[in-house]
Amino acid sequence: MSKYKENKLYIFNTLNRKKEVFQAMNPPHVGMYVCGPTVYGDPHLGHARPAVTFDLLFRYLKHLGYKVRYVRNITDVGHLESDADEGEDKILKKARLEQLEPMEVVQQYTNSYHDSMARLNVLPPSIEPRASGHIIEQQVMAEEILENGYAYESNGSLYFDVIKYHKDYNYGRLSGRVLEDLISNARELEGQEEKRNSVDFALWKKAAPAHIMRWPSKWGEGFPGWHLECSAMSSKYLGKRFDIHGGGMDLLFPHHECEIAQSVAATGKDAVRYWMHNNMVTINGQKMGKSLGNFVTLKELFTGSHKLLEKSYSPMTIRFFMLQAHYGSTLDFSNEALAAAGKGLVRLMSTLKVLDRLEPGGAPGSLDIGEFEKKAYGAMNDDLGSPQLIAHLFDTSRFINSAFAGNDSITAGDLERLRHLFGSFVSDVLGLTGEEDREIGGLVSKLVDLLLNIRLEVKKKKDFELSDRIRDELASFGIEVRDKKDGFEWEIKG
Ligand code: ZN
């Protein structure tokens, strides 16, 4: 079971900008924290990438025999519209626009997120804490930072003193930002006179009278700053020092930089041993954004209901498409690329079925099973090389199909090993599942449409007997046909 002992897993640690061998602090246990969504809208492509990336890591660590405690949070308070502690809380704004209680917004979009993640076959995390459920933990941590001299109170709010921190430690070492540049580039924003310096960030914000999401504290009624929840919740569930922290590259600065500063200011030590970041998603070569009209939600992808989409794409196609690229590269979505991924996925999944039905041939054939195993693990051990793993699976698919056609052979022992290896890499590690029901569903639609189009021609030729027979026989399978002036409509009536 403990394959982790014989596999050296290299991962790119953003903190050192190097590929390093992953060594768990307390094997077989691994603690892993990933920043989850701020739940004020349906999840979009930008949410799918980190979810699939860290699901791949979670699955592979478990495959190697680690016991992983995977914590992925839900941000339901404190994430303001601007990174500079300005603007409305994103949840509150949505609640105001939709005339809902803020926690109704949180519940609705948490459900929506869970639903889309389940369809992408993303495993649920071990713990999914919410920021609003950890106000006390955040206050305690803010207090520690204050006591250590790295925060100050101002008009009922509490700010992190970046300049003071930078004198003792190094602010900016994760993102590579230089503090002097940050200070000189900062714009003077309204309401920032509370801060000693524009680069300081809020640990606790005083709530304006109209702000509903508020909690009592020794600094007055308010709410926590966005960055604080991840520091407080990761240390609560994973300890003051833990193995892996992940998230999208867009969170490197300021969010993760501030997380590091908070942990170091509170405890004197770095909390995270390995920082990992997935790269961004683009659409037709452009950054995704509401103002660009290319903001595609996962629901829209699954149903094809967005003007940029030529058709719907199944959740597994989207998962497979993401896994075909390395998580550290940008990933461009286009109809062509998704269609190609869909075809690749069908090929791979059909190989899995062929493998089930393949009979051993007695004689060893052209497959070197040991070599396949080495390459598959080698790909994953090289910073989660899912594209290379998929390429090796396709190479082996060619052998499987050739053996099934009788042009190659495999011994019974090798076949058993191949089934186990191929199956666990496809299903357990890559998390790909068959979509045969959906595929068959698509085929049924095409066949019914074909039959009804033939029926239209039959009717034009006045062969009403045959036309009625087609309709009645379809009805006997539970398919109800309604004739329209310019065609037909049909539905399955159970
Ligand atoms: Zn976070």
Image (spheres, helix red, strand yellow):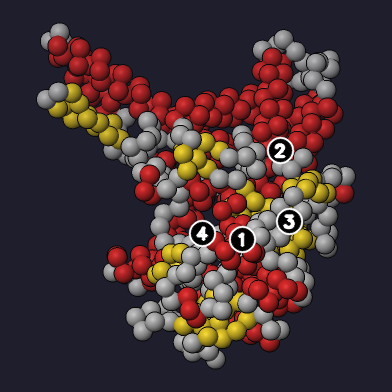
Q: Nearer the viewer, residue 79 or 395?
A: 79
Q: Residues within 10 Å of mark 3 (few under 14, many from 20)?
A: some
Q: Nearer the viewer, residue 181 or 388?
A: 181
Residue with the most extreme front position: 184
- Is residue 379 left or right of 36 when viewed as pictured? right
Q: Nearer the viewer, mark 1 or mark 2?
A: 1
Residue marked by disc 2: 385
Q: Which amino acid is tagged 4? A: Pro
Q: Earlier in the sequence, mark 4 or mark 2?
A: 4
Q: Earlier in the sequence, mark 4 or mark 3?
A: 3
Q: Quadrant of the C terminus?
A: top left
User: Which quadrant of the figure has residue 361?
Assistant: top right
Residue 16, given in percent of the width and then of the height, sits at 77, 53
Q: Which amino acid is tagged 3? A: Leu
For residue 248, above or below residue 351: below
Residue marked by disc 1: 181
Q: Which amino acid is tagged 1? A: Asp
Q: Earlier in the sequence, mark 3 or mark 1?
A: 3
Q: Residue at x 66, y 12 (%)?
A: 405
Residue 165, given in percent of the width and then of the height, sits at 69, 74
- Disc 2 to disc 3: CB gap under 8 Å: no
Residue marked by disc 4: 37
User: For the residue labelled by badge 4, is the local secondary structure a helix, a strand or a loop?
Assistant: loop
Q: Residues within 10 Å of mark 1 (few under 14, many from 20)?
A: few
